[in-house]
Image: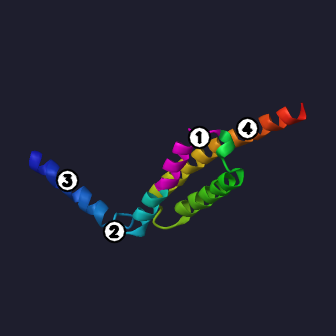
Amino acid sequence: MQRQLNYKIMNSFRAFLNSPVGPKTTHFWGPMANWGFVISGVLDSKKPPDAISGNMTAVLCVYSILCMRFAWMVRPRNHLLLACHASNESVQLYQLSRWLKHQWYVSQLTSA
């Protein structure tokens, strides 16, 4: 029983290793590198909103949407890249909302 389980696990790992989106390809390492954007965005959420660049955040939102479409359309589908950019889109939209709220608050203070 244990031997069969080990055999199945090794076959699954071997199949992943040699798959078109496995660690021997750029379909794996590209998304792994892109997780840096997500980590950076999460760490930046602790910074004050006046430190956020609205232009750069908007560009990152567009970039992630385009990459999500690419990840869905490319063959074989790259679910790792899709997940990475969906996460980045969420983080960047949160950052953009923080920036917009801050800009609105500052404009209300200066007009009053």
- Specify the principal SS of the magenta part: helix
Q: Tag 4: residue type?
A: His
The quadrant holding residue 76 is bottom left
Q: Give me the disc on residue 102.
A: 4
Q: Would you say residue 11 sits in the magenta stretch?
A: no
The magenta span reads 35-48
Disc 4 to disc 1, C-alpha distance = 13 Å
Disc 2 to disc 1, C-alpha distance = 37 Å
Residues at badges 2 and 4 in contact (C-beta under 8 Å)? Answer: no
- Mark 3 or mark 1, which has the lower sequence index? 3
Disc 3 to disc 4, C-alpha distance = 54 Å
- Circle 2 Cα neighbour tier, 10 Å, few/some/many (<14 / 14–19 / ≥20): few
| Residue receiving disc 1 | 47
Residues at badges 2 and 1 in contact (C-beta under 8 Å)? Answer: no
Q: Give me the disc on residue 8.
A: 3
Left-right relation of 105 to 112: left
Q: Would you say residue 42 sits in the magenta stretch?
A: yes
Q: Tag 1: residue type?
A: Lys
Q: Which of 74 and 34 lies nearest the eye of the viewer?
A: 34
Q: Tag 3: residue type?
A: Lys
The quadrant holding residue 98 is top right
**Which type of secondary structure does the marked residue at label 3 adopt?**
helix
Disc 3 to disc 2, C-alpha distance = 21 Å
- Mark 2 or mark 1, which has the lower sequence index? 2
Query: Measured from the top left, where is residue 77 in percent x and y?
Result: 48, 62
Q: Is residue 110 visible?
A: yes
| Nearer the camera: disc 3 or disc 1 | 1
Query: Measured from the top left, where is residue 80 in percent x and y?
Result: 45, 56
Tell me what residue is drawn at x 70 percent, y 42 percent: 99
Q: Give me the disc on residue 24.
A: 2
